[in-house]
């Protein structure tokens, strides 16, 4: 399989995780997931993790997965024209990828707080890759993508994430550009 097809396959499969992660700041609300609780002298998760953001982000990831399932026959036909294949998306894969993305994001915030990093503070690479920590193992287990796709995703996600966050920042959706 060509490396370009591996990249395309990885990007296709990871879409529900990308969309969930990107949707969180749009839907982020007030009900803190840590209920304002502290742990060892700092916020448990911080004000950036809300139930509204968590659930609506997952819903957005599932929704885009349904769109992917609907357009798959067309996408795969176009891809076949250049000798590529597009892996199938399933409702289970999309749902678990969205859940995994938001869980990885929570895990990162938990550890950021333990290291005393305030909400919204920047930790390069961790902020860009946190949602992939759990999503990539899920993608490997539930789809046809290979380790080559996973490697590409780790490489392309930080710049893609940064570009989208810069845009969201200028649109007023995010408070900080990371
Ligand atoms: N968000 C949310 N609920 C979540 C995840 C994200 O409401 N479970 C929203 C919040 O408005 C958050 C924004 O999405 O500010 C961006 O998410 P993220 O960058 O992960 O949060 P930060 O505010 O940067 O906080 P942290 O330092 O914990 O990463
Ligand atoms: Mg952040």
Image (cartoon, rainbow, N blue to C red):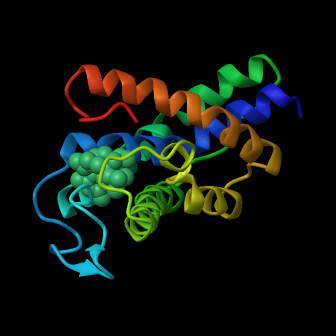
Measured as percent of width and height from the top left, residue 81 is found at 76, 17
Residue 19's quadrant in the figure? top left
Residue 8's quadrant in the figure? top right
Quadrant of image for the N terminus: top right
Measured as percent of width and height from the top left, residue 150 is found at 73, 47
Measured as percent of width and height from the top left, residue 125 is found at 57, 44
| Depth order, front residue of 51/177 | 177
- Residue 59 seen in the current view: no
Quadrant of image for the C terminus: top left
| Depth order, front residue of 158/84 | 158
Q: Is residue 104 left or right of residue 61?
A: right
- Residue 118 seen in the current view: yes
Q: Looking at the picture, does residue 129 appear above or below residue 101?
A: above
Measured as percent of width and height from the top left, residue 100 is found at 48, 62
**Residue depicted at x 66% and y 20%:** 78
**Residue depicted at x 73% and y 37%:** 152
Q: Looking at the picture, does residue 137 appear above or below residue 25?
A: below
């Amino acid at each position: 399989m060509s490396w370009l097809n591996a990249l395309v396959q990885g990007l296709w499969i990871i879409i529900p995780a990308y969309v969930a992660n990107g949707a969180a700041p749009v839907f982020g609300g007030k009900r803190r997931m840590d209920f304002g609780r502290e742990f060892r002298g700092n916020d448990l998760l911080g004000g950036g993790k809300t139930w509204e953001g968590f659930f609506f982000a997952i819903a957005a990831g599932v929704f885009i997965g349904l769109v992917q399932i609907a357009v798959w026959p067309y996408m795969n036909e176009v891809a076949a024209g250049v000798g590529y294949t597009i892996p199938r998306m399933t409702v289970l894969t999309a749902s678990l990828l969205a859940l995994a993305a938001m869980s990885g994001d929570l895990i990162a915030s938990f550890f950021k707080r333990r290291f005393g990093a305030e909400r919204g503070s920047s930790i390069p690479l961790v902020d860009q890759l946190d949602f992939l920590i759990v999503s990539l193992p899920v993608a490997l287990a539930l789809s046809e993508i290979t380790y080559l796709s996973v490697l590409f995703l780790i490489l392309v996600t930080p710049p893609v994430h940064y570009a989208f966050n810069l845009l969201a920042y200028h649109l007023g959706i995010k408070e900080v550009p990371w």
